[in-house]
Amino acid sequence: MAYTKNQIDGWLIVDKPYEMGSTSVVTRLKHLFHPTKIGHAGTLDPLATGVLPIAFGQATKTIPYVMDGKKTYTFEVSWGVQTETDDVQGEIMAQSDRRPSREEIEKIIPEFIGTILQKPPVYSALKIQGKRAYDLARAGTIVELSERPVVIYSLKILEYTSDKTLFEVVCGKGTYVRSLGRDMGQKLGCLGHITQLRRTQCGPFTLEHAISLEKLEKTGYNGDTSFFVSVLTALDDILALAVNGTEAKELRQGKAIIATSRFPLVKEGTVCKAVYGSRLVALVKREDGCFKPFRVFLTLEEKIE
């Protein structure tokens, strides 16, 4: 059955349910909204829950800015067992009778803050010669993944028991929380694996923006987009450039505009968001005394007068 595509522009923040992949969420939303374009920012493992930003229409052009933003997770590590997947789904690889004290955990936390080297889990979505690492691992292929630098901004204990400890971490792009739990367990000499994982923030989006997939499907779609978040929200940290109607038209036509004295002093190479009133016109870069558009935002309902 053919459907008419709906022009929807904005972010929908889903509280991803347990045991569902990020791609499956997108597929369900495609059937619900029939959008012209859709994509997600920042994959969550099936066993993880929480903030999964879904971009619709023009918002898909801002996905990289959300993916590059900071992420916050709460996660529980169960001490004494290491699994092949670094979470509860994997087979047990090794066990230990040792359990860490709170003081021992607090002592090693500084070693996991800042830019650190981290080896991704063998069961990850990383590609090796065009194939996903988890597909190779499940097929019995020995997977070797190199360490890579990631950034941990903060890491703290929320709740402690000798068997399980709940943490909160604020981290940068590409960080694997499963690896973090595994590495802390190895550092403490007691081993460990993730038993709970929830993302509470992804870039500018938090759980306060989130809505459950169950509620969305129960409500259905009747043209109401009140639960969508503006495309501009993904660009909160980017300098705004207020343009007039003529400049907005030129930018939307892919033309550069001159950096006149009306604009604040912007260094060469700086990326800005050009806005006309409350409307996002384009992402531009200052080059050779001009602002050159490299992402243009066109919507059916927003015409420049």
Image (spheres, helix red, strand yellow):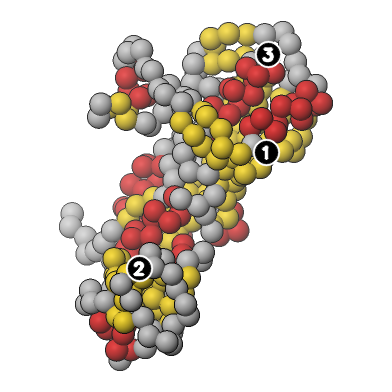
Instruction: Find disc 2 in the rendering and name its residue.
Output: 285
Rendered residue at 49%/16% (across/down)? 84
Q: Amino acid at mark 2?
A: Lys
User: Residue 225: in sight, yes or no?
Assistant: no
Q: Position of residue 97 (x, y in %)?
A: 72, 8
Badge 3 density bin: few <14, some 14–19, many ≥20, Cα 10 Å? some
Instruction: Find disc 3 in the rendering and name its residue.
Output: 189
Closer to the camera in the image, 268 or 54: 268
| Location of residue 118 with respect to 260 vertically, above or below | above
User: Residue 25: in sight, yes or no?
Assistant: yes
Instruction: Find disc 1 in the rendering and name its residue.
Output: 155
Left or right: residue 251 versus residue 181 is left
Badge 1 density bin: few <14, some 14–19, many ≥20, Cα 10 Å? many
Q: Amino acid at mark 3?
A: Gly
Q: Which quadrant of the figure has residue 254?
A: bottom left
Q: Which quadrant of the figure has residue 129?
A: top left
Closer to the camera in the image, 174 or 231: 174
